[in-house]
Amino acid sequence: MKRIFLLLLALMVFPALIFAGGKQEVAKEEGPKEVKIVIRAKGNPTEHWKVDAFDEAVKLLNEELQAEGDNRTVVIEKIFDDASWADVVRSFAMSADAGEAPDIILGGHEHIAVYSTAGYIIPLADSVSEIKKMYPEFDDVIDNLWASCMLHGKVWGVPQDIEARPLYYSIPKLKALGWSNAKIKALPERIKKGEFTLDDMIATAKEAVAKGVVEPGHGYWHRPKRGPDFYQYYFSYGGYFYDPDENKLVIVEDALEKWYAFQRKIVDEGITPENFIGTDWRIWHDTVSHGKALFWNGGSWQWGEWAGIYLKDQGGQEYLFENVGYALQPSGVRGKSGGTLSHPTVYMVTTEKASGRKGRDLAVRLLAKVTTKELNTKHAVESTHIGILKSQANYPPYNKDRFLSDVIYMLDYNYFLPNHVMFSTWEDAVWEGMQAAEIGQRSPQDSTAATIKLLQAELGDALIVK
Amino acid sequence: MRFKIFFSRFVPYLLLIVVTLPIIIGYVWILISTFSTRTYGLLPVDKAGRPGGWTLSNWSFLSKPEIWMVTSNTFILASGLTIGVVVVSMMAGYALSRIKFPGRKAFLSLTLILHAFPTVTLLIAIYFVLRWISVIPVLGRGLPIIGGFGYNTLGGVILVSLALQLPLGIWLMKGFFDNVSWDMERAALIDGCSRFRTWREVMVPQIRPGIAALSIFSFIQGWGSFIIPYSYMVNANRATIATYLNNLLSETAPTNYSMVAAVGLFQLLPVLVFYIFTQKYLLSIFAGGVKGAA
């Protein structure tokens, strides 16, 4: 018995000692006839085309391969869920370190910095002009979107979607406040020209609360949970994130203080509830979509969620067009045009080491097949994301969508987050300071000082304080 | 006198009913909710809030292949965990109960310390171990059904769950073996039985209630397992029923709680049935081993 036991033990331990620490086995040099490509994306149910578009794309790719006499056939596996970004990044990093990552990962463009530094993703081209020449589909991508995919002069991703973060307003509430139809209609243009600022918005919302047009605390609702939407206020007051010449993150002290003061002011003026941060998304969506708030900031993609989920029984988009208006985020400085933060999501291709598979060329080629007006429009229309292709502007299934056509001008006033590896540290610090200012834990001035001190301690030379 | 009988017979039941009522109402709500569009308290209502709104749509997930895949995964995980925990605990428990060897006390103490560690604190360390196992040929990623014992395999999840479940199992089994009379064991050894045969043919039959209890306990643990498959499987939402359930709770989109309740009930049913028929064994965890044993 003892001998059998020892023999079994030796059989188990021996290969472990011999092979432990060895290289991950990848596909044989000959190349398998069937190449598996795993795609992972995150999104809410209306964004399922982020992965489902690949069903059609892979058919097109396989037809092309067959026509070329290539003996490879691509099969895909799709992973789609609505986990938090933090969970997605954690799970992806663990799988990439273990050589089990998907071949194509969809992420925010700012993930490029972290993933490329860690060696998880490959550069797709050495320049924008090079990637445009690779496949005609890439030449159709709106030119300024490539900026969000760049790092150290190389292209690391392919844009999948983009959005605007408009200021929404309730049309019936503005009417109840005495605004004429013409005045309401002119609001987006006034915001665009910098004639209606954040201060004007606060004053209007305060008036609505005072006159009982909306309930106290329902004059203005920002996003209820952490997210990049808040940086729009920082930008509105003249702040910016990044100095590309120095490759350093930037914090503009004056803009930061004005942003924090804004967060406190909306509570002090009674247009946003006390302790609003952390409100459940369901409550937030339900309140704003049913026009119970006067102004609110949201994403263009949320229009689709409200129409398809919250207002499905009231008429969906028809109801929304009658009751809700949208404009750029107002500037904090009179005379300065409004703007919007765009956060393109991008497809990235993982390295052979991270995925444990070969066939990177096919993964890139598959991305070209999915970057078409036909497939991208399905996603854009269903999830109300703005198109990423030049050809979509004249593509009837896209341009007959009234909302998407209406908001596309906002891309002329947009800006992006920086692709900097330490940006999440910057975000952690400013978020902490913003919360402290809004809930009244610290004054905006103290919060600004504390945030800058924390940023300097955490980022050191990677930060420029203006 | 009558009052006294009434008091002693019925009052405890009344008290128990009152105390358990919230739990019973919870179960009733789950059941009603799974067949309703929405609920207002325990009343099913339609989208407009009128009474009615009965539907089978919340059970539509049963027609999707994913649910059967995750159910099968969950069953394999729970069964693998049960077999592993019971076999290793029986052997380790016996050794710790009956054999004197250097480091026995230290081993017992360390086992207890391991049990005190919250799983979440070990996740990263265990991840590195699984990565190391992954590169071992065959054992890492080349086994049928469970895939292997490395990262992103069902076997890896079983292995980790097993390691974390073992301290409890070993201590339980040791407790049961401690209660078995030495006389029987000595008689077997004097009659020429080997130590292994004594363990297998004399000792193990004496602790059957304990084995049954540990099996049930381990199976239930494996069936509801979430954090380990969620952390170590790449496509976590297709790993087990618990991770599948988690995926129904969207971060931003509204959640269909009636469907969540239906999947929850689907997950709960086997455990409930299992528990109803085996609770007497489960309770023996707290009762000890052989009756009348020294």
Image (spheres, coloured by chain):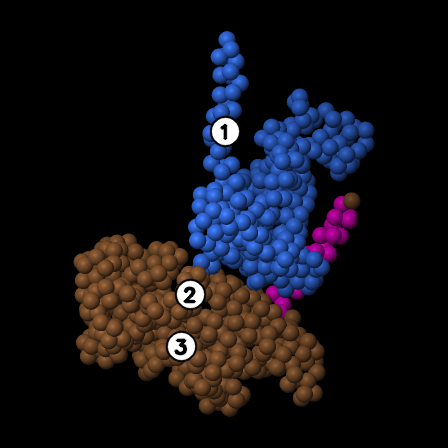
Towards the viewer: B285 or B62: B62
* Residue position marked by numbered label 3 in the rendering: A402
Answer left or right for A308 relative to A426: right
Q: Type of residue at label 3?
A: Arg
Q: Secondary structure at mark 1?
A: helix
Q: Colour of chain B?
A: blue
Chain containing the residue with disc 2: A
Q: Is residue A304 above or below residue A72?
A: above
Stretch in magenta = A2-24
The residue at the point 64 percent across, 77 percent down is: A74
Q: Is residue A357 above or below residue A45?
A: below
Q: Type of residue at label 2?
A: Gly
Q: Quadrant of residue B86?
A: top right
User: Which quarter shows the C terminus of chain A?
Assistant: bottom left
Marks 2/3: CA–CA distance:
15 Å
Towards the viewer: A304 or A240: A304
Q: Colour of chain A?
A: brown
Q: Secondary structure at mark 2?
A: loop
Q: Type of residue at label 1?
A: Ile
Mark 2 crowdedness (10 Å alpha carbons): few <14, some 14-19, many ≥20: few
* Residue position marked by numbered label 1 in the rendering: B17
